[in-house]
Image (cartoon, rainbow, N blue to C red):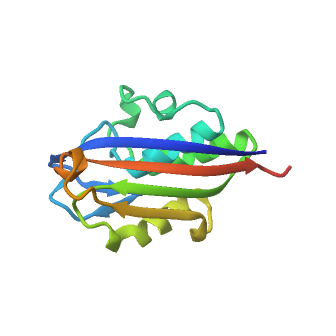
Amino acid sequence: MTRVGVGYDVHPLVEGRDLILGGVRVPYQRGLAGHSDSDVLAHAIVDALLGAACLGDIGSHFPPDDARFKDADSMTFLEETLRLLSLNRWRIENIDATIVAQEPRLAPHVQQMRERLSSVLGLDINQVSVKGKSTNGLGFEGRGEGIAAHAIVLIDTAQP
């Protein structure tokens, strides 16, 4: 059986935080506000994977009011999601994700994000696509107020 999942996340940009996207520190003067490291790319992928497997959403597994997840590395969310998928006999076929940000320029970091995500999820790099898009100055992303990410995943039943 094959299933598709869609994920979305957004966080505001603030001073005094590192910008982490896809498990990679991206040099920039601001970072994303939130309870964990606020990695919108990882969060969108987690939501897409959990949704495809009908296992809830990121908030039900990693609640923002739980002290255990304060400043947590979102790669641990991906690892736990992979564990849950495996327990429920699902395997990831591919991930296609888009980060929406006016700044910083993401193209120089996309390959490293793909490498990090594929490593954490035990996937071939050719199963993980990451793209960066700007909004040409439109919307909250275009005004530099925040960064959003969208993800779509394909999962399939794991062989016994």
Q: Is residue 76 visible?
A: no
Task: State which quarter of the image contains the N terminus.
Answer: top right
Residue 3 on image: x %, y %: 69, 44
The total of numbered circles placed on residues is 0
In terms of image quadrants, where is residue 29?
A: bottom left
**Is residue 79 found left or right of 88 in the rendered image?**
left
- Residue displayed at 24% across by 41% down: 33
Q: In which quarter of the image is residue 63?
A: top left
Comparing 82 with 55, the one in front is: 55
- In the figure, 64 relative to 43: above or below? above
Q: In the image, is residue 15 above or below residue 112?
A: above
* Left or right for 71, reference 50: left
Q: Is residue 21 visible?
A: yes
Taking the spot 83% from the left edge, 52% from the top edge, the residue there is 159
Residue 158 placement (x, y as % from top left) = 78, 50
Q: Is residue 12 left or right of residue 78?
A: left
Could you say which is closer to the camera, residue 82 or residue 10?
A: 10
Q: Which residue is drawn at 43% across and 65% down?
A: 113
- Report the residue at 52% width, 48% height from top: 78
Rendered location of residue 125, percent (x, y): 57, 69
| Residue 25 place in picture, x, y as percent | 31, 61
